[in-house]
Image (cartoon, helix red, strand yellow):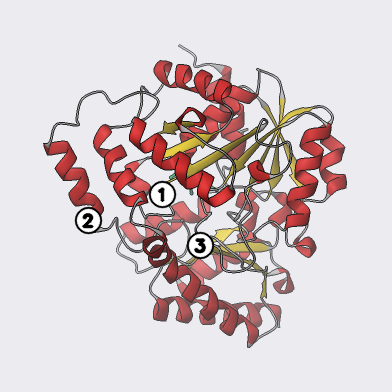
Amino acid sequence: MRQSERIRGLTGGGSDGWDVFLKARRMIAQGIAVTELTIGEHDVRTAAPILQEMHRTAIGGHTGYAAVPGTASLRDTVAARVQARTGVPTTRDNVVITPGGQAALFAAHMAACDPGDTALYIDPYYATYPGTLRGAGAVPQAIRTRAEDAFQPRAEALRAHSANAVSLLINTPNNPTGVVYSDATLNVVAEICREDDLWLISDEVYDTQVWEGRHVSPRALPGMAERTLVVGSMSKSHAMTGSRCGWIVGPEAVIADLITLATHTTYGVPGYIQDASEFALTRGERFEAEIAAPFRRRREIAREVIARQNTVGLIPAQGAMYLMLDVRATGMTGEAFAYDLLDTHRIAVMPGESFGASAAGHIRVAMTIEDAAFRQALETLCRHAERRAA
Ligand code: PMP
């Protein structure tokens, strides 16, 4: 039996960019100590009070099928949060709860795109994006950006493809670059979406991790609420990656269709996970700032370490849990540098190329280990780059 073309073609063929990561994992399995700066997972686990709430509500009986769109009270909580943060009137009818941001990205493209439609996304990109778009039947088209522009998309690059496209996916604060889109970038994005009648799919899963500038949800820009689907998640803001709880916020009619899609695909999110998520969301901004604090601190450490040398360049680290480092001065590709660093110093980072051609000659560092070890790893990384550049 042969599987469908759709599923066989999901990754687009070739390497899916995880080779260095997998090599690091194999070394760890062999008992070799590797400093892991690859994936975006907090070094703290979900806070005990959230787990206690999960336990309380599960023991209390919320273990049957939960309401497919999400519980009314979680949808209300998400709507109130979004309205408070953006000023855009939002009710539970604008919200569907999904099994994490990843499922929300897929569902949003199912709602926006028909098979064969062109779906735009910005390179460098979160590694799952092209496969997610293909999975929804769309034809992914990358929009290239440049390190010199801090990887913010230019109007001309967007306009080169926007007339023939149906949707545009953006992500700010950005994984993998750590950049927060400027007001100017978001205004251009919104203008092009309005002019060329595009859906804007706005991945805002890092919206509580902003170190510089401010997070603007493009749904709040003029004429955008009717064409924007916002993807949110509990994963990064509340250290709940394993709980798989996220959402889409959008126009009522689209949300109604997305609820139908949920009925025929996921059939909702466990009730006790939703209750715990609601509880977590009502912990308030102080709690969210605590979850974000380690990354804020380590970003300062990184700026200090990198300012003391001039081989490795730092793309403005404005948000999210990553640094994008320019290692082009070594003359190596990001991938070659990442393998070399792993083999020589047992430090694992992601090659920029794993996130698209625009990030060639760069590496992504996840700020997900304890401060002193993080500082030491970065110092070693910089010295290594200096030696290779010499
Ligand atoms: N979007 C981006 C940019 C991400 O980095 C991630 C997770 N790394 C997700 C979406 C999906 O997160 P989750 O499914 O855990 O909500």
Give the residue type that dot 3 points to. Answer: Met
> Does the rendering let one see residue 10?
no
Q: Tell me the SS state at disc 1.
A: loop
313 to the left or right of 379: right
Give the residue type that dot 1 points to. Answer: Ser
Separation of marks 3 and 1 at Cα, in angstroms: 12 Å
- Asked which quadrant contains residue 111, the reply is top right
* In front of the other: 112 or 366: 112
Q: Are marks 3 and 1 in contact (CB under 8 Å)?
A: no
Q: Earlier in the sequence, mark 3 or mark 2?
A: 2
Q: Residues within 10 Å of mark 2 (few under 14, many from 20)?
A: few
- Asked which quadrant contains residue 77, the reply is top left
Give the residue type that dot 2 points to. Answer: Pro
Q: Are marks 3 and 2 in contact (CB under 8 Å)?
A: no
* In front of the other: 3 or 136: 136
Q: Position of residue 44 (x, y in %)?
A: 32, 63
Q: Residues within 10 Å of mark 3 (few under 14, many from 20)?
A: many
**Which residue bears the numbered disc 2?**
49
Q: Residues within 10 Å of mark 1 (few under 14, many from 20)?
A: many
Outermost residue, bottom direction? 308
What residue is rendered at 73% in x and 56% in y? 183
Q: Is mark 1 within 8 Å of ligand 1?
A: yes
Pair 3/2: label in front: 2
* In front of the other: 383 or 316: 316
**Which residue bears the numbered disc 1?**
235
**Which residue bears the numbered disc 3?**
321
Q: Relative to 219, is 361 above or below?
A: below
360 to the left or right of 89: right
